[in-house]
Amino acid sequence: MTTFRDIAPRLLPDLLSGFALLTRLPVPGHAPSGAGSAWAWPLVGAVLGAIGAAAAGVALWLGLTPGVVAVLVLALAAMLTGGLHEDGLSDTADGLFGGWTRVRRLEIMKDSRVGSYGVLALVLLTLARWSALATLLSAGQVWMLIAVGAVSRAPMAVIMATLPNARGDGLSHATGRPSLPVALAGAALAVAIAFVVAGWSALPMLGLVALATALLARSAQARIGGQTGDILGAAQQLAEAAALAVLAARAG
């Protein structure tokens, strides 16, 4: 079993490797590592959430409206990650719903072109995230973004650990599969961060995130026989939207 004693010596290297893998932030001397660092991905998400929260706080202080600030926060998040997760969402929607066979679905997901399902998924989920985020900002709950960032990165490791890779190439295959204890360590870390930041609001948030993750994992297993990097990106986006929706409902 993975324990804190096992993880402690790898804390900083794994965290920096996580930034190198999941963001566009410069991390000199650290390349994306294998899936053994997946437990640290919620920490990466928490830091990205803190950056977004700080930017939102400054923008609100300058007098910008919550709706405009929500757009800026979403744009900043996409720039920090290079649109990695949004790309996965669009490819997942095109592949899972645009093909009739496993092989064809995987071909569509690998295609760089975006189809109608991908466009609809991006537009609708971005609108959902924007609406919920604007509500949170109107309520002055900018630091909830830390919890959202952490919680939305945990499903990627869990799906990687529980589903086989659906193809023999791509980012997910190159990264490898984390062991289940490593994935669960990341999930536990995300849960802890969520409760520290959001209090008991974390409970329904985590429940909806778990449901969204389970539904996506089941669909990926049934339609393509496992997970890919695109599925992982979609998992992050769905989890983020679910977390924001619950927090916005409780804030409103």
Image (cartoon, rainbow, N blue to C red):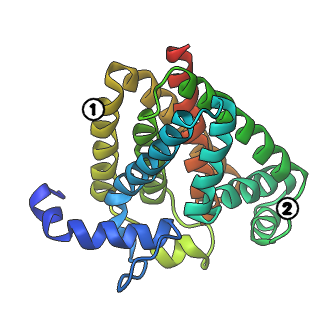
- Residue 69 lies left or right of residue 223; in this view the side is left
Which residue type carries mark 1?
Val
In front here: 215 or 34? 34
- Image spot of residue 96 (x, y percent): 76, 52
In front here: 56 or 215? 56
In front here: 197 or 67? 67
- Image spot of residue 3 (x, y percent): 14, 56
Using the image, determine if residue 243 lies above or below residue 7.
Answer: above
Q: Could you tell me which residue is drawn at 60 percent across and 32 percent down?
A: 63
Secondary element at tag 1: helix
The number of numbered badges drawn on the structure is: 2
Which residue type carries mark 2?
Val
Residue that badge 2 annotates: 114
- Image spot of residue 163 (x, y percent): 50, 57
Quarter of the image that includes the C terminus: top right
Q: Could you tell me which residue is drawn at 34 percent across and 46 percent down?
A: 187
- Image spot of residue 149 (x, y percent): 45, 45
- Residue 26 lies left or right of residue 11; in this view the side is right
Tell me if residue 110 can be seen.
yes
Quarter of the image that includes the N terminus: bottom left
Residue that badge 1 annotates: 196
Secondary element at tag 2: loop
Farthest residue, direction right: 116
